[in-house]
Amino acid sequence: MEYRRMGRTGLQLSVLSFGSWVSFHKQIDDSIADELMGIAYDRGVNFFDNAEVYALGESEKMMGRVLKMKNWERSSYSVSSKVFFGWRGKNNKPNQTGLSRKHIFEACHEALGRLQVDYLDLFFCHRPDPSVPIEEVVWTMHNLIQQGKILYWGTSMWSGAEIMEAHRVAQQYHLIGPVMEQPQYNMFERYKMEMDYQPVFQNVGLGTTIWSPLAAGFLTGKYLSGFPEGSRLGMQGFEWLKDRWIQEEKTNKLRMLDTLAKELNVPLAPLAIAWTIANPNVTTAILGATRREQLEENFRALEVLPVLTPEVMTRIDEILQNKPTLNLM
Amino acid sequence: MEYRRMGRTGLQLSVLSFGSWVSFHKQIDDSIADELMGIAYDRGVNFFDNAEVYALGESEKMMGRVLKMKNWERSSYSVSSKVFFGWRGKNNKPNQTGLSRKHIFEACHEALGRLQVDYLDLFFCHRPDPSVPIEEVVWTMHNLIQQGKILYWGTSMWSGAEIMEAHRVAQQYHLIGPVMEQPQYNMFERYKMEMDYQPVFQNVGLGTTIWSPLAAGFLTGKYLSGFPEGSRLGMQGFEWLKDRWIQEEKTNKLRMLDTLAKELNVPLAPLAIAWTIANPNVTTAILGATRREQLEENFRALEVLPVLTPEVMTRIDEILQNKPTLNLM
Amino acid sequence: MEYRRMGRTGLQLSVLSFGSWVSFHKQIDDSIADELMGIAYDRGVNFFDNAEVYALGESEKMMGRVLKMKNWERSSYSVSSKVFFGWRGKNNKPNQTGLSRKHIFEACHEALGRLQVDYLDLFFCHRPDPSVPIEEVVWTMHNLIQQGKILYWGTSMWSGAEIMEAHRVAQQYHLIGPVMEQPQYNMFERYKMEMDYQPVFQNVGLGTTIWSPLAAGFLTGKYLSGFPEGSRLGMQGFEWLKDRWIQEEKTNKLRMLDTLAKELNVPLAPLAIAWTIANPNVTTAILGATRREQLEENFRALEVLPVLTPEVMTRIDEILQNKPTLNLM
Amino acid sequence: MEYRRMGRTGLQLSVLSFGSWVSFHKQIDDSIADELMGIAYDRGVNFFDNAEVYALGESEKMMGRVLKMKNWERSSYSVSSKVFFGWRGKNNKPNQTGLSRKHIFEACHEALGRLQVDYLDLFFCHRPDPSVPIEEVVWTMHNLIQQGKILYWGTSMWSGAEIMEAHRVAQQYHLIGPVMEQPQYNMFERYKMEMDYQPVFQNVGLGTTIWSPLAAGFLTGKYLSGFPEGSRLGMQGFEWLKDRWIQEEKTNKLRMLDTLAKELNVPLAPLAIAWTIANPNVTTAILGATRREQLEENFRALEVLPVLTPEVMTRIDEILQNKPTLNLM
């Protein structure tokens, strides 16, 4: 396993990590979670990702039970949670969602309880909350670090400007700013990682824990024969055509990627994951497997990585036609 | 003429202003420049925009000569320059372009000389320069303000994240940060103004001096009968189709806008300019006319402005289908 | 016993102190540790030095057991630990060594457990860690002070430039900077204390807790009859000669020092220790004896100290020929 | 010519530059200075180095006359001066040397006069001055930048700890810190560049303008047949032997370097200069030639640079046996 420093921090995360998302509790039970986390840990994974909203808290509870059973040294792994959506679904009351000091503070305590740990290594703002001053967010996260309840804080799905505003506020009040982001990043979603965050990477540093490296499964190739025919009754002629066009273009690219993968003699899914971690600004790509075979195939990304020579990367860019560029003139 | 505070500053700019761009010197001579600037000034325009690179310095020289002849009170107008590209064209040597302290410092002195003024009211970084630390840029602009050579400094074509990084640095060293941006903004170019800069407007304030409110003339309606058939011999079938599609979609929207304009009984160009200044985050839209008639038509945007009721704005959004939105889930 | 303020802090340490290093656990058992620490405490020693890596944690555990048995007033002594190397030897995983927030945080908790104390008086970064931003180190140490888990933090084997960088960061964020260093310092190792740290002593203050005042035993005189003939088979003529030369030069100096000691009628080892603490920038010299007689001879340094008149110091410098000087031209 | 950013600044300097040192005025007259500076400028050199003390001011006067005659665009080159020693030689009165605000301020004005320029691009503290608080130095340099009299300030022959102390003070008062150093650096003088400044390069950035890349001519090979027999009557047997040993070791290394140069089919002097600029932390190496042929041979370093493959660099290290290393254990 390769380990990378998370941005400019001293924390080292395995370049592939394991997340529970919504799959935990809903699709798998404790014994499968135990098996998958065990495989991951033995393969060198040292980061387990979670959030209050995943399966409305049940995902964290399940991970907490597994961690307790496993009894690994606490310093040998890092565990995260995320705050924003609450865990009560439609029953959230005011202050049980969002990024107010009250909800961040309470969400942290509740996550510690569900995960049965004394501190979270990483704690994320799951989304920006335009209704709360960023000052309040930065202060609260800073205070949680001071209290020893979390070690590093970061954001998820924030824009570069929002992250930099958090750093400006941290600068103003002499606080600890956000050090990692959890963005979506894959072959079809490149703008934030490859354009918007560039001044953040360059000026203040930013680790990234990538979700959806397989584009919600699209890059496993399961739509190679085309998108399922959804109901487009509500769409007017113009819209329908545009939508159709986008899907056909995407499926077309997928077919070309699949051909390239066959030529390189590697499966498509690990190729797509390897492409993600080939970006040096990626700290770790989070795998969300629900079956042993699936998880083990995903780990093949480590073998595939050396296949991604500059030439192969160029060919992929030629297929994708979506590399963001900065036009200085 | 309506005047607006430039962001959170105390400076008031006319909501329509006048820029020379490359047209000066190349397309028009001193007498036409004199005529156009006179009309603008008489209509209440108090901001004249320029840059070192426009016509490689000749644009500023021409504007300088006109300002000298006119002999208006210096306090009755504001004048700008922009630094980045140098004015020697291909003969630039190292440090004669970019945003090093040396070039900003020397470019400011040279612009003062060409424009024949003692100070610039606004001084812009014409582009971001990723090879220079933003600290050096902020310090240098701050020092020029201290020396009385410029009054306000800002950016042009920077991302929200880059602007916020400048503010973070200003915060750190207790310096004067950038207070205005000169972005492209029009019905077909909305992302930066309506999405990327939102946290900047909200958290630190930002005036905007808009260039290309007519999308390089496209919104005058001159392409209503379709794009000119350019050479697409080099494009393969797939690309050609996509390109074709985008142009047809755009021309289609233009036709619908034209229909709406006729229904509202206003010409298309002033409608498009009025749409731009209807955004309260816009300080001023820069007009770049080269003929008297053209300039006077553009000024009709002021009459058109009240026509843009919430209902009309909604109809325009329905035509454009490009309002940027933030997906929180 | 003489007590000195540790740099510009208010903490007073005995000018001779006691350290366990690797000798604990390996060379001596609990009863000898108990005897030696008792002698030291009775002689007025109020600082006991330790580190997570000494005997892989066993040294701290032994010292912890002795401190518990002795039941001295907690306020009557100071105890330290050091973080960097981890205590698992070759079994360290990522984040179980180095100066990341995670390891500093966890190492502190683990040291408190092994030493059976509620707080460490001194906590050292055992080495610089170039892969972690100094910001993260300073913030984490500051937070441990805020949490009441440590009282003072410092460094060991850092360069003057690294210590000043920590102070710059502390200045930037208004944090508590490092206040002591644990360098090697003896007659044959003078550069850091007498040259490199000078601007630190002068500008921000720095206490020093010296290790190896006897140059790993060399200054006890045990090599007076020459270095043991090591295997130099692998060295080529040139190298062998140079190495030989250096050793002979050093042994030669040692003989001259021994002659001087005899003339002054003091043993060599206490003379060498006294020479160390004669430097007013030294707060304390750490003794690492493993036998009662050895420890008691080392304490004679206190009697020898007045013998070190300016004249004697000059004679020692003439023998050593290694006083670092600053050449301004 | 290759250009490099000076540390983290935006200023680009040619990797080879031209310095007048003491040679100007004493060894050469205006016409030779004119010829050499012309050759350098035509080869792409854009940095001309000077100091108040070089030839007691005459060197700057000569360079000023040449610059005036040449009438190059001011933005096409950078020029420096250095303050510390004064220019009156033994006739310096109090405050006519050192780094007091009075002398820095007056030395700057005097250098501007001698060089006949409106501002210095670079201004160096020629040495540290322990008798002046670094605060006063940083403030004065900062103020000169604010006043537009200098663009960048730096140090010469300062230690890493002293440079970082300047940065700490700059941080404290929110001032512009030093951004470049002028150290000696060559094959026989490596400690500062390769060890002491490492945390400065890494944490705050530092450009370096190297003097004596040829070790005061030693690396031209003129001592290949051994050092001249100096008078060593005053030395005692022991000292004489050591001194002798050091010189023989150095000459021996020089012979091996000469053999390597012959094998690589390049002259020794350009090889030594190329070795200096092969270090990426070097911004520029200052050439101090007094004859056209000598200058042109030195420029051959640019051709030699590609010869310095990792393998050749390793062989050079094996010859020199002086690469500074950090022992973490």
Image (tube, coloured by chain):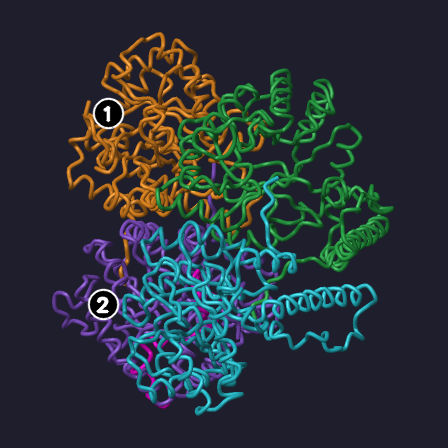
Chain colours: A purple, B orange, C cyan, D green
Viewer-proximal residue, C206 or A48? C206
Residue A326 is a magenta residue: no
- How packed mark 2 is, by other alpha carbons closer than 10 Å (few <14, some 14-19, many 20 or more), is many
Q: Name the element at disc 1.
A: strand
Mark yes or no: residue B53 visible. no
Q: Chain of mark 2?
A: A
Q: Name the element at disc 2.
A: loop
Q: Could you say which quadrant of the image residue A78 lies in?
A: bottom left
Mark yes or no: residue D290 visible. yes
Residue A85: give its label.
2
Q: Residue at x 61, y 31 (%)?
A: D49
Q: Mark 2 belongs to which amino acid? A: Phe
Q: CA distance from mark 1 to mark 2?
A: 44 Å
Viewer-proximal residue, C28 or B243? C28
Q: Mark 1 belongs to which amino acid? A: Ser
Q: Is residue A41 left or right of residue B169?
A: right
Q: Is residue D14 left or right of residue A60?
A: right
The magenta region covers A4-33
Spot occupied by residue B145 in the image (x, y as percentages of width and height): 34, 29
Q: Could you say which quadrant of the image residue A287 lies in?
A: bottom left
Viewer-proximal residue, D208 or A321? D208
From the image, tell me which residue sits under label 1: B14
Q: Is residue B142 above or below residue D118?
A: below
Q: Residue at x 48, y 70 (%)?
A: C303
Q: Is residue A200 left or right of residue D302?
A: left
